[in-house]
Amino acid sequence: MTSPLPPRVLIVDDDPDLRDLLSEYLAANGLQIESAGDGTTMRQAMARQTPDAVVLDLMLPGEDGLSLARELRAHSGVGILMLSARGEEMDRVIGLEVGADDYMAKPFSPRELLARLRALLRRTRAAAPAEQPAAIPGKHCFGPFALDISAHRLLRDNHEVRITTAEFELLRVFVERPNRVLSRDDIIDLLKGYDRDPFDRSVDIRVTRLRRRIEADPSNPEYIRTVRGEGYLFNPLGAQVRR
């Protein structure tokens, strides 16, 4: 039997020495660690793979930790542990109000941080509405569907679903970036060989066609949801989770 993968933790802090210290300590204690120094690199890391928890510094260059915590909470259920060199009660209250699950003031003990993280990971896993299917390289599963990238096929209950190349490529964009809002510009950029037109609405047409393939009720979609004024979000749990 394959052992479960250790929890993934993303550390977001502009202090490289602290990032290195925490990365080394947490990795030595059985966690998978990735780090980022600002909001841009945090989003890049999130796009590659959603972590189980984020350790997020309040005071960051450019976008601060509060705005990033609000963004994370709007788009995912990832656990958030916020750090701050300021220990004022108001900072803690605001951090928790925008979506952080826990809050620690600097300086702190890495041992206490590890204990807090483990508690947070237990809570978030216990609260998860359903377990994701086991990952298979090149295959993304959601509901009764499986998108096989290498074979260029969409299966429903192991039966092939007819799908055009354009629909396949759009679905691939979505399944590789679950629980993340993608604007129309994002989707155009991610679709290879797609010519940009600032007045082009064909992304919406593609989404409509794809919904007809995978949604039980395309007029009330469960997997590819419209986020008003922002774009689209792919939720692999479908009707099991309503945001």
Image (spheres, helix red, strand yellow):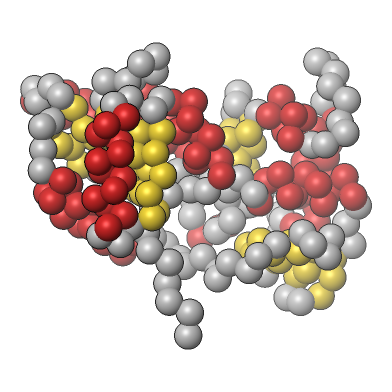
In this rendered view, identify the residue nearer to me: 214 or 11: 11
Answer with left or right where residue 107 lies relative to residue 166.
left
State the residue at coordinates (80%, 15%): 198
State the residue at coordinates (84%, 60%): 152
Q: Residue furthest bottom?
A: 1
Relative to 55, does residue 53 appear above or below in the rendering? below
| Residue 103 picture quarter | top left
Residue 190 location in percent, x, y? 74, 35
In this rendered view, identify the residue nearer to me: 20 or 195: 20
Total number of numbered labels?
Answer: 0
Observer able to see residue 56:
no
Residue 21 location in percent, x, y? 25, 41
State the residue at coordinates (77%, 30%): 188
Residue 80 location in percent, x, y? 30, 42
Relative to 48, does residue 62 appear above or below in the rendering? above
State the residue at coordinates (30%, 39%): 20
Answer with left or right where residue 162 lies relative to residue 91.
right
Observer able to see residue 95:
yes
| Residue 94 picture quarter | top left
Answer with left or right where residue 142 lies relative to residue 61.
right
Relative to 59, does residue 148 appear above or below in the rendering? below
Answer with left or right where residue 142 lies relative to residue 152.
left
Residue 119 location in percent, x, y? 20, 57
